[in-house]
Amino acid sequence: RSRDRRDAWDDPNSAVAQMQALAAVQAQAQLQRQMLVQQQPLLNPPAINPLNPLSMVAAATAAAGVSAASGVPANDAQARKSREIYIGNLNIGTVTIEMLTELFNAALAGMVPDPVTNPPVINVKMDATGRFSFVEFRTEELATTAMTLDKTELCGRPMNIGRPKGYVPGTSTTGTRGSESGSDALSGVRIQLMLVAAAMHEQYFSTT
């Protein structure tokens, strides 16, 4: 009679089905645990442990809004916009990235402590056609000063200098640093830029 009493596990087909069901339940539970682990940093910010430098870095990163995927602060693009200027109406085929870099580095050299090691210009991006460019400076104050050089002639054409699209005023701009001293500084920058631009203009037309 005991032979007639077969447990469900004695049936090969039934045992396989139960094992498959158990494996499916375990897989679903594992997936739920992974989802909870991924959501945990959002629900509970990382605690700061003074004895653990890594925890301090993680907390600072979360507070600064750094994306784990890109590693770029959320406000970095906005800060870069505040340090950039747009330059249009360039002489196509004549004005180069190197020329713009040299021009503004020379004109604004007096506004940085060490123009050789840390020049005013960080980066210059030029349109593929050479019609316009974007110049990024080391500080927002440098970009604001460069704005006053609008309509200065370079290689026979006046530059159209303005703020890039999406610009939002920052907090680092110090303006003209007083009425008289600021005006004198801007006049010196403009004169320096005009001299450098004139030298580039003469050099270009003497070689063509």
Image (cartoon, rainbow, N blue to C red):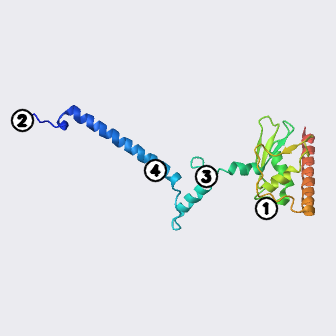
Quadrant location of the C terminus?
A: top right
Camera-near label (2 vs 3) is 2
Camera-near label (4 vs 1) is 4
Q: Earlier in the sequence, mark 2 or mark 3?
A: 2
Q: Is mark 4 on a helix, strand or loop?
A: helix
Asked which quadrant contains residue 90, the reply is top right
Q: Observer-nearest residue: 125 or 67? A: 67
Q: Earlier in the sequence, mark 1 or mark 3?
A: 3
Q: Which amino acid does label 1 sit on?
A: Asp
Q: Which mark is residue 1?
A: 2
Q: Where is residue 148 in the image (x, y as percent from the top left)?
A: 88, 51
Q: Observer-nearest residue: 137 or 19? A: 19
Q: What element carries label 1?
A: loop
Asked which quadrant contains residue 24, the reply is top left
Q: What residue type is labelled 2?
A: Arg
Q: Is residue 165 left or right of residue 7?
A: right
**Where 4 falls versus 47 (above or below)?**
above
Q: Which residue is drawn at 49% across and 49% down?
A: 39
In contact (CB < 8 Å): disc 1 and disc 2: no
Alpha carbon separation for disc pair 3 and 4 = 19 Å
The residue identified by callout 1 is 114
Alpha carbon separation for disc pair 1 and 2 = 99 Å
The residue identified by callout 4 is 37
The residue identified by callout 3 is 66
Q: Which amino acid does label 3 sit on?
A: Val
Alpha carbon separation for disc pair 4 and 1 = 48 Å
